[in-house]
Amino acid sequence: MRIDERKQRVLLAIVQDYIMTAEPVGSRTIARKYNLGVSPATIRNEMSDLEELGFIEQPHTSAGRVPSDYGYRYYVDYLMECEKLNQDEQNFIDKEYDKKVKDVGQVIQRTGQLLSQLTNYAALVLVPRVGLSAFKYIQLVSMNPTQAMVIVVLDSGSVHHHMIEVPEGITQHDLGLITNVLNAKLQGLNMKSIKLTLIKEIYFELSGYKRVLNLAMELLEKNLTMEKKDKIYLGGVFNILKQPEFHNIEKVKTLLSLLEQEQLLCDLMSDIDDEGVSVRIGGEIKNEDIKDCSMITSAYQLDGKIIGRLGVIGPTRMEYAKTVSVVDYLTKNLSLALERLLRG
């Protein structure tokens, strides 16, 4: 539903003032602070109409008005002008992404830290999946005459280790030879990239160590496959608890319980399929425990394909205009950083 220009200006004033002060907004406040060119009585009439239409609501008797979820949605869709990052903020972000990183995990963590720092909300970054993680390094270490440890490091930053049985007589020198061949052949590849011809080459060069090699390759495949499961980076949780909306102990407990559920957060992020910046307000998130929150997310890409999402979660009284710009700018930077890291 579109409303007339005067109602739009009154609604815009209410939303902007409430976002800034966290205090219900009255007609006299609007008349004093915003030059709308109409009398307080006219503003009161417009506010009454807006309340009847569901754009604003009265939290308690004798109070001013606050935006409803519907009011925020109208503001985001029709009234909001995105607040662009200033040059200093852009330079700060660019400088952070110019720092050398060793793996995907570091890039994700840095992005999450920037998100929470620049918005003062909790940051969420869905880690790249669907087989993106690649083999970075493997090491076989002799632990005793019949056992060795296989250490697998992936470019997502995760490290896995397993004990395997080895034939008697296998020395650390033998394990070192296997380690060198595997690293030389497999480094930088994911499971989709490891071809049968390459595996044949490895077995040919290490024909004397087939038993150990079978176990090492089995573990490598298992760990790369595990990385297909969604994971999420969560940062700046205490930012959201600083907001006045969450000074209520029960609300805090509920929210913290939600933020501890990694799979639920992954599902919330994965359910959003918009390619650009997406804004979900209150009940639009479709989770009762998060009805007092909004999520702003965006999809980041590699080679033109969406591989994950990043975003923030905060109160519905969120600085949408600034946060949308931050999320959009970091999304583009993360995509470029992954391109440089994973594609050279």
Image (spheres, rainbow, N blue to C red):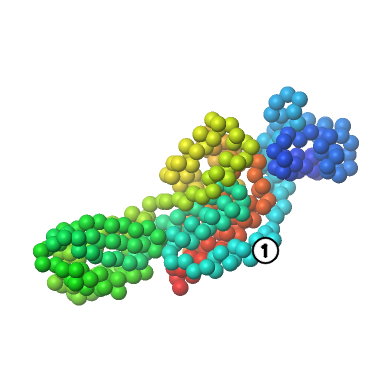
Q: Which residue is mark 1?
A: 88
SS label for mark 1 = helix
Residue 263 makes an appearance in the image: yes
Query: In the image, 246: left or right of 127?
Result: right
Position of the C terminus by quadrant: bottom left
Label 1 amino acid? Asp
* Rendering quarter of residue 2: top right
Q: Residue furthest top?
A: 61
Q: Residue furthest front?
A: 144
Q: Identify the residue shown where x is 85% and y is 43%.
A: 36
Looking at the picture, does residue 44 appear above or below residue 170?
above
Mark 1, other Cα within 10 Å: few <14 / some 14–19 / many ≥20? few
Q: Residue furthest left?
A: 168
Query: In the image, 309: left or right of 208?
Result: right
Q: Identify the residue shown where x is 55% and y is 41%.
A: 285
* Rendering quarter of residue 313: top right
Q: Identify the residue shown where x is 33% and y is 67%.
A: 137
* Rendering quarter of residue 194: bottom left
Tally of numbered discs: 1
Looking at the picture, does residue 98 appear above or below residue 76?
below
Q: Position of residue 287 (x, y in %)?
A: 51, 37
Query: In the image, 292: left or right of 31?
Result: left
Residue 55 makes an appearance in the image: no
Q: Position of residue 133 (x, y in %)?
A: 38, 61
Q: Position of residue 315 (x, y in %)?
A: 61, 41
Looking at the picture, does residue 184 appear above or below residue 317?
below
Position of the N terminus by quadrant: top right
Q: Position of residue 7 (x, y in %)?
A: 79, 39
Query: In the image, 239: left or right of 75?
Result: left
